Image (spheres, helix red, strand yellow):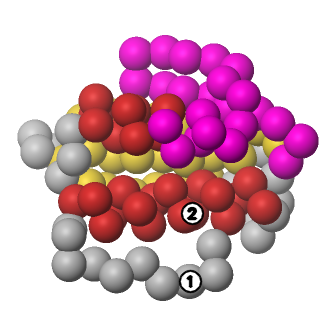
Amino acid sequence: MKYFHRTHLSPDDVVGQAARWFGARLSPTDEGERRRSFGGPLGQLSVTVRAEGGHYTLVTVETDQPGESEIDKLGKRFLTLLHTSAHQGHQPIGAY
């Protein structure tokens, strides 16, 4: 599955948050300038960021599992937490 999110956070902030969030749950498998990949018993996941439109950052989370798998839920939760990080008044809700 592939998920997208556009944020006002800088690419470096997003990569740092991805390393902390997924690194605590999965093993790092690959690292690039604006890409991090992780793996574990749940499957493989990669986070790619790129600057878009000047002050936006496009975040792509991609997994090797079908939708609604546990690793997909981790990816969606990460995107929700990014949104909360950029917008302090946002209250994350949902089961993932």
Residue 94 is marked as 1
Residue 68 is situated, as x and y percent measured from the top left of the image, at 76, 70
Task: Count the numbered circles shown.
Answer: 2
The residue carrying mark 2 is 76
- Badge 2 crowding class, 10 Å Cα cut-off, few under 14, some 14 to 19, many 20 or more, is many
Horizontal and vertical percent position of residue 1: 70, 55
Which residue is at 67% across, 64% downward?
73
Q: Quadrant of residue 39?
A: top right
> Residue 76 versus residue 3: which sits nearer the camera?
76
Does the magenta-highlighted stretch encompass residue 30? yes
Secondary structure of residue under mark 1: loop
* Residue 55 in sight: yes
- Distance between the alpha carbons at the discs numbered 2 and 1: 10 Å
- Do the residues bearing badges 2 and 1 touch, measured as CB atoms within 8 Å? yes
Quarter where residue 43 is shown: top right
Label 2: which secondary element: helix
Marks 2 and 1, the one that precedes in the sequence: 2
| Magenta span | 20-42
Left/right placement of residue 17 relative to residue 90 reads right
Q: Estimate how packed mark 1 is, as few (under 14), some (14 to 19) or many (20 or more) residues with alpha carbons within 10 Å.
A: few
Percent x, y for residue 48?
Answer: 47, 35
